[in-house]
Amino acid sequence: MRREGPPGVAGGAAAVREPLRTEFEFELPRGFVDESGTVHRNGAMRLATARDELVPLRDVRVRENPAYLSVVLLGRVITRLGTLGSVHDGTVENMFASDLAFLQDFYRQINAEGHTRAAVACPHCAEPFEVELAGSRLGES
């Protein structure tokens, strides 16, 4: 019996794997306004670790109000936002509700499915297609 290579690899060639992507770019629909009035829209979010999801559960604010969990969690995984020196739960607290909702959806997308594409259908012809959520503004595809 002749073996060509590892199971699932045709012709004995090593499978070419893309490197694991751990950080994803985004653009907020409205933008975070800092103390000086500067609007920050472009940022990046990294994949969450188990620790990222467990540590906020010990936070008193989360215990008193479970809805605060997403604020603390997003403050841990957003790695960059505009020209801000750092992003933390206080930053997320002061975001517009539409930006918070966007980031919650974005978090679910990259952590549950591992990519930022979503399958959708045209509302007029029902033709299915994919849209890229990362780095696009609402209403754009």
Image: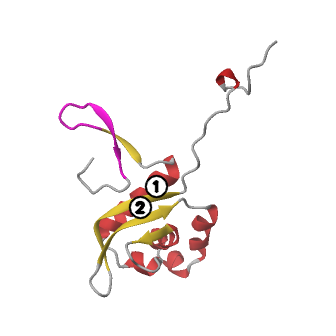
Instruction: State the residue in front, 117 or 42.
Output: 42
Q: Which residue is at 42% across, 49% downward? A: 116
Question: Could you tell me which secondary element the residue under label 2 belongs to?
Answer: helix
Q: Residue 90 falls in which quadrant of the image?
A: bottom left
The CA span between labels 2 and 1 is: 6 Å
Model colouring: secondary structure
**Residue 58: image x %, image y %?**
60, 76
Point out which mark residue 108 bears. Answer: 1
Point out which mark residue 104 bears. Answer: 2
Question: Within 10 angstroms of label 2, few (less than 14), some, or many (20 or more) residues?
Answer: some
**Residue 87: image x %, image y %?**
46, 76
Q: Amino acid at mark 2?
A: Gln
**Residue 98: image x %, image y %?**
29, 65
Q: Farthest residue toward the top?
A: 1
Q: Farthest residue toward the bottom?
A: 36
Q: Is residue 93 magenta?
A: no
Q: Which residue is at 23% across, 52% downward? A: 139
Q: Is residue 135 above or below residue 2?
A: below
Q: Which residues are magenta?
A: 121-133
**With 17 as the anchor, is 44 left or right in this view?**
left
Q: Is residue 130 magenta?
A: yes
- Residues at marks 2 and 1 touching, judged by CB atoms closer than 8 Å: yes
In the picture, which quadrant includes the N terminus?
Answer: top right
Q: Which residue is at 47% across, 75% downward? A: 65
Q: Which residue is at 32% across, 66% downward? A: 99
Point out which mark residue 71 bears. Answer: none
Q: Residue 28 falls in which quadrant of the image?
A: bottom left
Question: Within 10 angstroms of label 1, few (less than 14), some, or many (20 or more) residues?
Answer: some
